[in-house]
């Protein structure tokens, strides 16, 4: 009963937060003609970071981040990691400390306010059943990375079962390779405990570990099968150790 009431209160707070973000959108769009593309994306990320941080902390959840030193300070960057929960995106935007966009599933494009802000980051929506559209999305996202803005992709495609790591789609490796981007693996451990237990909101302890990067000059980089195996095993090992 307590969790049910807590969930209702959190949902009310989240609606207020989304309304505030909605009000911020026209203001952000008005600045677009007057600032550089890089500046505009940075401004959009500042709003997304505040939204992500508030979305997480209002659940009572604590996120411990380790490995930020593994994030390159310059050049194209592609974050690749496991997918546990609807709360993965706010956890990453709110706590990594680096502007980023997302390769997100097409279903998220049906959420009006979220869709519009994700587009500003920018993010791209992927139709898993449309190979031609996927190629277009990857081309657009790789160009964004070449311009210095990091992208995030979840190679499992769907949220994995509690605390596990699903199979990695080999096509996901192509995103980083198209931009010649440094791959930064990450592990999210515990976001599923926030809501996936029973549909109610729970305070959780979440670990966000940023693992050593894989650079374009590394021998494994060009081999999609070996690269996917390496990334998945590194993430899975990190989960088992936490």
Image (cartoon, helix red, strand yellow):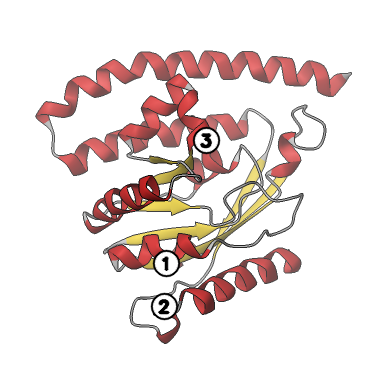
Can residue 99 be spotted in the picture? no
Disc assigned to residue 221? 2
- Give the image location of residue 147, x and y in percent: 21, 54
Q: Name the residue under label 1.
A: 183
Q: What element carries label 3?
A: helix
Q: In this view, does 60 lie to the left or right of 123?
A: right
Asked where in the image residue 223 lies, by quadrant, the reply is: bottom left
- Give the image location of residue 5, x and y in percent: 80, 16
Q: Is mark 1 on a helix, strand or loop?
A: strand
Front residue (pair 32, 153): 153
Compared with 37, 152 (above or below) is: below
Q: What element carries label 2?
A: helix
Can residue 118 be spotted in the picture? yes
| CA separation in Å, label 1 and label 3 | 24 Å
Front residue (pair 104, 58): 104
| CA separation in Å, label 2 and label 1 | 9 Å
- Give the image location of residue 6, x and y in percent: 76, 20
Q: Which residue is drawn at 69% across and 33% down?
A: 60
Q: Name the residue under label 3.
A: 53
């Amino acid at each position: 009963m307590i969790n049910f009431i807590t969930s209702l209160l959190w949902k009310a707070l989240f609606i207020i937060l989304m309304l505030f973000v909605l009000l911020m959108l026209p203001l952000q769009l008005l600045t677009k003609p007057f600032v550089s593309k890089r500046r505009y994306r940075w401004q959009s990320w500042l709003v997304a970071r505040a939204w992500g941080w508030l979305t997480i902390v209002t659940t009572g959840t604590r996120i411990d981040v380790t490995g930020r030193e593994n994030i390159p300070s310059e050049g194209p960057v592609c974050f690749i990691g496991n997918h546990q929960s609807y709360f993965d995106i706010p956890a990453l935007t709110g706590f990594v400390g680096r502007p980023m966009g997302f390769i997100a599933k097409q279903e998220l494009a049906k959420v009006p306010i979220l869709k519009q802000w994700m587009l500003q980051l920018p993010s791209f929506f992927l139709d898993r059943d449309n190979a031609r559209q996927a190629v277009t999305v990857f081309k657009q996202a790789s160009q964004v990375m070449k311009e210095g803005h990091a992208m995030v992709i979840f190679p499992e495609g769907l949220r994995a079962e509690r605390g596990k790591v699903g199979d990695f789609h080999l096509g996901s490796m192509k995103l980083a390779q198209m931009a010649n981007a440094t791959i930064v693996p990450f592990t999210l451990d515990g976001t599923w405990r926030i809501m996936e237990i029973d549909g109610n909101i729970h305070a959780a302890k979440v670990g966000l570990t940023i693992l050593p990067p894989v650079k374009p000059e590394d021998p494994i980089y060009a081999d999609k099968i070996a690269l996917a195996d390496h990334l998945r095993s590194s993430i899975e090992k990190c989960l088992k150790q936490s």
